[in-house]
Amino acid sequence: MGWWRTTGLRVLVHTGALLPLIWIAWRFTQDNLTANPIREIQLETGRITLTLLLLSLACTPVFHASGFVPVRQWRRTLGLYAFMYACLHLLNFIGLDYGFNFPQIWGAIADKRFPLAGLAAFVILVPLALTSTRGWAERLGKNWKRLHRLVYAAAVAGVIHYVWVAKSQASTTAPFIYGAVLATLLLVRIPMVKKVISRPGAE
Amino acid sequence: MEKINRSEITPEQVYLSRREFMTGAGALLAGTLLLPACKGGGQVAQNDFCSTAKAQATADELGNKLTACNDVTSYNNYYEFTTSKTGVAPLSRNFKTTPWTVTVGGLVDHPKAFTVDELVSKFPPEERVYRLRCVETWSMVVPWLGFPLASLLNEAGPTSNAKFVRFETIMDPTRMPGQKDRSYDWPYIEGLRLDEAMHRLTILATGIYGKPLPPQDGAPLRLVVPWKYGFKYIKSIVKIDLVEEMPISFWMKTIPSEYGFYANVNPAVSHPRWSQATERRIGELTRIRTLPFNGYADEVAGLYAGMDLKENF
């Protein structure tokens, strides 16, 4: 049981976070990424980024509600994996999709709100990923926690990015599901709500 | 030295998990970069339709090669079946298109109903290779089989009041599961101004790649207007009416701020959500510039002389 709580579950989290990437790579080798693989990679990496980001944000409330200690460590792991997929998402956009043609990229994002929201989310995530090491946590002291609260801003910008790219119709329920999950995660951060769901001693 | 709260120090397990993360992620990234090398260079298996399909032409008039038959028949926007592009072909596999009647009516001297067989024998289809530009910024080069819409309209004889043509897709939620989605106002409607409809480039397509249309591409009869975005190419048509007022199309009704009546391909007028300046030709890696009127400006720009194309998007 002890082994499972520490190593076993950790392996499971890493595997789970990497599976989507393996799945995309496998579909690529099988010519199974639709007739428009670059668009498919864009959509898939975007959804995975948001999923992992929300899962990362869910770790703390789940810990508070369950008192299950290992879940606290997954927050950072899942957050970093979310950042990895966000990097792939952005790289696919500027590299594969636009061939690093920056004038064209500028033309594609300059007056369009959905790519700007995505870019904002990414820009917020960069310092969080860079300062996720122990050294930076020590160096920044109290400010580290403050800085890393920005992850909520990144998640909000990311979900808005998803809502804005979608058609304003019912075929687009997915972005709103992400929005509802994020809203719930923000709700349980409110001290009063937090107190209600928390198990005694899980602080 | 400032005192650091114990709870703020990263526990050993966490930073170890970071190392695992970096190792795992690094290995996977390297693997991803190597993947193209492992990808077999052999021929892609043709689907049933394409294994016997053959176009006469190999390219359009500008030298653009035809899009692979497999791509044309597997990547479809056809919301009557599903909003998943790759889901249309499997879901529409058993869609029956015989018998099929198309009525031509409204403001015409000779309203009439035709079967598709009648249309094909009356107006023998010819191959037309056209670029298809989807409003979603991807494009294809498609060898259609079809006949000029003008031939059919002339047969019906539009009256002097007729100003527009209104097209309607079949309405049958039992055979088209996407039509059960009540958030859309089915059936699909499209429209053209009479001069657009009479233009020699405008065809009613009955086939692609030398064969009758497969269901996922709009069998048995669809509109093709190559200088307009693909959503104008209404599929599985059952009704063509000549009318006096501008028809309200499916997408105009659904999202009026994003989709207008004209929908002419125009790199200078962006979609509210994205730029229309470039496009990806399916099967190619790099983006190409989108041409005004999809490259048919010489033939059709005159139809819109004096019109504000930003206003009439």
Image (cartoon, coloured by chain):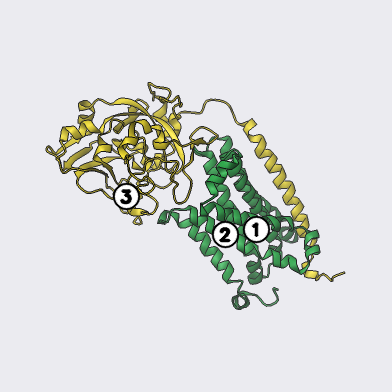
State the count of labels: 3
The kind of residue tagged 2 is: Ala
Q: Which is more N-terminal, label 2 or label 1?
A: 1
- Give the quarter of the image for residue B167: top left
Q: Chain of mark 1?
A: A
SS for dot 2: helix
Where does the image place residue B68, in percent across and percent down from the top left?
A: 45, 29
Depth check: A92 or B18 in front? A92
Above or below, comparing residue A130 to residue A37 in the picture? below
Above or below, comparing residue B122 to residue B86 in the picture? above
- Give the quarter of the image for residue A41: top right
Q: Are marks 1 and 2 on the same chain?
A: yes
**Residue identifier under label 3:** B250
Q: Chain of mark 2?
A: A
**Residue identifier under label 2:** A157
Please tell me which residue is depicted at 75% across the width and 61% down the height of the picture: A2
Please tell me which residue is depicted at 74% across the width and 54% down the height of the picture: B18
Where does the image place residue B282, in percent across and percent down from the top left?
A: 48, 34
The kind of residue tagged 3 is: Phe
Q: Is label 1 in contact with label 2 (beta carbons under 8 Å)? A: yes
The green chain is A
Please tell me which residue is depicted at 52% across the width and 37% down the height of the picture: A32
**Residue identifier under label 1:** A124
